[in-house]
Amino acid sequence: MDLTWLSANPGLTLLALLGTAFAVLLLSKWIRYIPNNRVGIVEKLISGKGSVKTGLIALGGEAGFQPQLLRGGWHLLTPFQYRIHKMPLVTIPQGKIGYIFARDGKDLPPTQTLASNSHGADFQDLVAFLQNGGQKGPQRQILREGIYAINLAQFVVLTEDQLYYLPLDKSELETFQKMSAIIAERAGWRPVIIRGADDAVGIVTVHDGPSLQSGEIIASTVGEDPQKASTYHNNFQDADKFLVAGGQRGRQYQVLVEGTYYINRLFATVEMIPKTVVEVGTVGVVVSYTGAIGADISGQEYRHGELVTNGQRGVWSDPLLPGKYAFNTYAGKVLMVPTTNFILKWTKGEVGSHKFDENLSEVSLITKDAFEPNLPLSVVVHIDYRKAPLVIQRFGDIKKLVEQTLDPMVSAYFKNVGQTRTLIQLIQDRSAIQELSGVQMKEKFTQYNLELQEVLIGTPTSGAPGGQIEQILVQLRSRQIANEQVETYSRQENAAVKERELREAEAKAKQQTMLTESAISIEVQSNQGKADYAKAQQQAAQIQTLAGAEAEKVRLMGEGEAKRIKVMAEAQAEQAARVGIAQAMAIEEQVRAYGGPQFQLVQQVMNRFAEAIEKSQVDVVPKIHMGGGDKGGGSLIESLLGLLLSEKAGQLAGVVPTTAPNAEAEALKAALRQNLTK
């Protein structure tokens, strides 16, 4: 383009710029851009078919909001004929719920709370929704997690974090805010979650559908068969199928157990209640408020109420055994009946664990002697679990049974007993009265389907400390103490007599013990003596045997020794004899050589004398010799010489020795000489 020409003609330049701007403006009216994260709601401003006669959405091309949406991209539209409203896509976060409000559609009937979606369930196809009979107002169907391209001129989407809609009127905002507040109050932005640890059940109350019949308080269970897809509402998550199945408005008999449920809170609310727990030792008798009216199975003779089979209205014949139950407590009541023994105490201030006796107190009596004691007592009762429904059917609950029947019956019985006995008899005969009352009252308890186990009677009291009854009891105790003392003294006296007898018996026993011990000692010593005697005999026999053996040994040894000595003696004698004979023969020869035995003797004496003088070194001739007139004295030499001279004198005088030779010696000599000569 030649800009110099434009600069030379400024008027033409301005005109060109204005034309360009107009062309751009005209082009922008033809071409529209929609981002991919948004949708375009088309509002037709000019149409040859005129405006919409009824409703809000122009299904036939009339002027008004068009049902089709413009998605992301460029779109060619006739200028000045359409207005485009760019709106965001509807986003439902994970684990959240979105609610739909339709501005256009069929009007709701007076009995309907929410719009049905049985035919118009696709909110992204507005044409199908309206043509299939979609209804205006809050819808029964909800939006789950995801992103939706919805025409926000027709539908208003309510979420916890945002309100998706195309504003048309300021008053609408208040309506949608109230609707959001109701949903938030019912915790409707999230699904119903029942955890196993909660031990809870969900009670469902439906706010749409036909009302209950007159006299009904609980809607019956419908649409619970998964095999019937057309009516199975899957625990109220499909509202239209629930109503098709015949569901009714109001509190439902069916309950929700553990799980997650996406329920439209505008259609139904859920209340959490704890599970019914029947503890061990009890049974639960069900009184149902709903169900079909059944036949009485308690029998024609039983006129205390009707007993029906389980599931029917009335008292169920089969109680709930110990366990946990998802029981709808709005549809009935479960009365716990103990099946273990329980104690009823007629004692003020004392209450059993079941608290059936919290309003009971001591029985007031009037005795035969006009005393008015209060009698505390306890009754042990058992209820057969099979008869528990009969008890509930007859009395309503156990506490009413105790207060309205057992208390008057037991009190009247013991009042009658008290009038027949004095106070002292009442105290002293307690055990007999207790045993008799247990027998007589057992039959009465059986009439009420109860089993009486035991009756326990306490000590009568006057109700206040220091009363007349306590004084009588003190006197009785004093009297009893005196009687006991008398009995004690009597027993002590008897004990003393018995003790003396015991001492005497003990003394005799001691002497008897000594006698017995001495007799035993004598017998023991006798036995010991016999044993010693036998032992001595054995030892004597042993010694005798040993002595005999030793004597024989000694004898044999003596004989041997004697023989030895004899042989040795004979040998020595023979030797000595031989030596002696030899010596004798030698001496004889010597004697013969000396001239005779006298000379031999003198010779030997002189030899011995010489040897003695030599050994003693005695002087032969004394150095000093003093003589005297004493004739008796003399020296040894003189004596020896005198002997020799006398002997010699005898020989000279012819004196021969008179000793004759021994014959045996001579014989022996002869034998020896004979042996020597051999």
Image: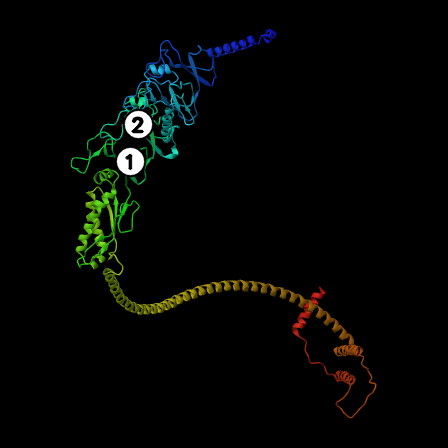
Judge whether 150 appears above or below 12 on screen: below
Judge whether 105 appears above or below 650 on screen: above
Judge by depth and name the residue closer to the eye, 636 or 392. Answer: 392
Residue 218 percent coordinates (x, y):
27, 30
Q: Amino acid at mark 1?
A: Leu
- Specify whether 283 is left or right of 585: left
Residue 17 percent coordinates (x, y):
54, 10
- The picture quadrant where one finds residue 530 is bottom left
Residue 69 percent coordinates (x, y):
42, 15
Q: Amino acid at mark 2?
A: His
Judge whether 638 appears above or below 141 on screen: below
- The picture quadrant where one finds residue 494 is bottom left
What residue appears at the point 39 percent right and 67 percent down from the top-left corner? 522
- Specify whether 513 is left or right of 567: left
Q: Earlier in the sequence, mark 1 or mark 2?
A: 2
Is label 2 in a helix, a strand or a loop?
Answer: loop
Residue 28 percent coordinates (x, y):
48, 12
**Mark 2 crowd level (few <14, some 14–19, many ≥20, 10 Å Cα):** some
Judge by depth and name the residue closer to the eye, 465 or 385. Answer: 465
Q: CA distance from mark 1 to mark 2?
A: 32 Å
Q: Is residue 361 visible?
A: yes
Residue 207 disc label: 2
- The picture quadrant where one finds residue 96 is top left
* Residue situated furthest bottom in the rendering: 629
Q: Is residue 260 visible?
A: no
Q: Considering the image in quadrants, where does the N terminus appear?
A: top right
Residue under numbered circle 1: 320
What residue appears at the point 80 percent right and 90 percent down from the top-left corner? 627
Is label 1 in a helix, a strand or a loop?
Answer: loop
